[in-house]
Amino acid sequence: MKKIAVVGPIPRDTIITHHKERIQKYGCITHPCIALAKLKQDSGSVFPIAHVHKKDVTPIAELFSKFPAIDMRGVDDSKDMGTVIALEFLDQNNRVEKQTAFMNPILPKDVEAFLEVDAFVMVPITDFEISLETLKYIKANSKAKIIFDAHGATTCLTINGDRLRRF
C-alpha cells in the first residue's frame, strides 16, 4: 500500500494523569498517522483527514513536519471547528472524559480528493464524526480497503459533553 488516508478528529487533549501530571497534546488520528508515516518512510503517503480549529493548524503541522510521508492536504480549518477533550485519569486504567468542542462530521466532500488511496483508516472517537453517507460514498467510488476502529462506536456523549462508554 502506497497511500493511506486516516480519517477522524485531531483533538486538542488535556490529560491529567493519575499522578496529577498535566499533559497537553494532539491525539486520536495523530497516533496512527505518525506510526504509518514511520513505516512508510519514503515509500508512500499518509493523508490525515480531519476538521480542526484554525489555531491548531500550525502546531499540528509542526508535529507532522518530522514525518515527510504525512501530507496535510486533508486537514481542514475552514469552519474553525475542531475537537477539544479533557481526560482525567482516576487510576492507571480508568478515566473521566469531557468533550468541550466538536469537529464537524467528515462528509463525502472531505474524502472526495482521496478516493485513489489504497486504504482508509477510520478512527472516530464518537459515533458522529464520520457519517454513514461518507462510508457509503467511499464504498461506491473507491477500491480502497476500509479499516474501522471501534472506539467511536463504543463511546457516546451526554448533552453536557461527558464521554461515556457504551456496552
Image (tube, rainbow, N blue to C red):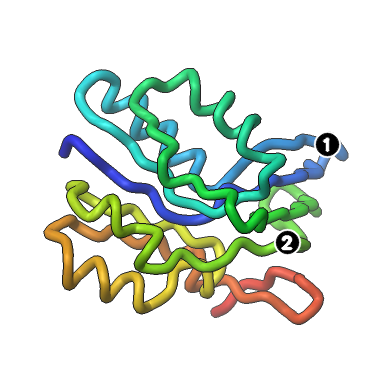
Mark sitting earlier along the chain (1/2):
1
In which quadrant of the rendered view does residue 107 lie? bottom left
Q: Position of residue 10 (x, y in %)?
A: 57, 48
Q: Depth check: 104 or 151 in front? A: 104
Q: Is residue 70 above or below residue 164?
A: above
- Label 2 near label 1: C-beta < 8 Å? no
Query: Local crowd at mark 2 within 10 Å, few (<14), some, or many (≥20)?
Result: some
Say which amino acid is labelled 1: Arg
Q: Is residue 160 above or below residue 90?
A: below
Image quarter hosting the N terminus: top left
Q: Depth check: 49 or 26 in front? A: 49
Say which amino acid is labelled 2: Ala
Q: Is residue 166 above or below residue 94?
A: below
In which quadrant of the rendered view does residue 108 lie? bottom left
Residue at figure coordinates x 61%, y 50% from the top left = 52
Q: How many marks?
A: 2
Q: Would residue 36 be found to the left or right of residue 151 on screen?
A: left
Residue at figure coordinates x 73%, y 57% from the top left = 95
Residue 101's disc is 2
Residue 60's disc is none
Secondary structure of residue under mark 2: strand
Mark 1 sits on what residue?
A: 22
Q: Would residue 68 be found to the left or right of residue 97 on screen?
A: left
In which quadrant of the rendered view does residue 145 lie? bottom left
**Outermost residue, right direction?**
20
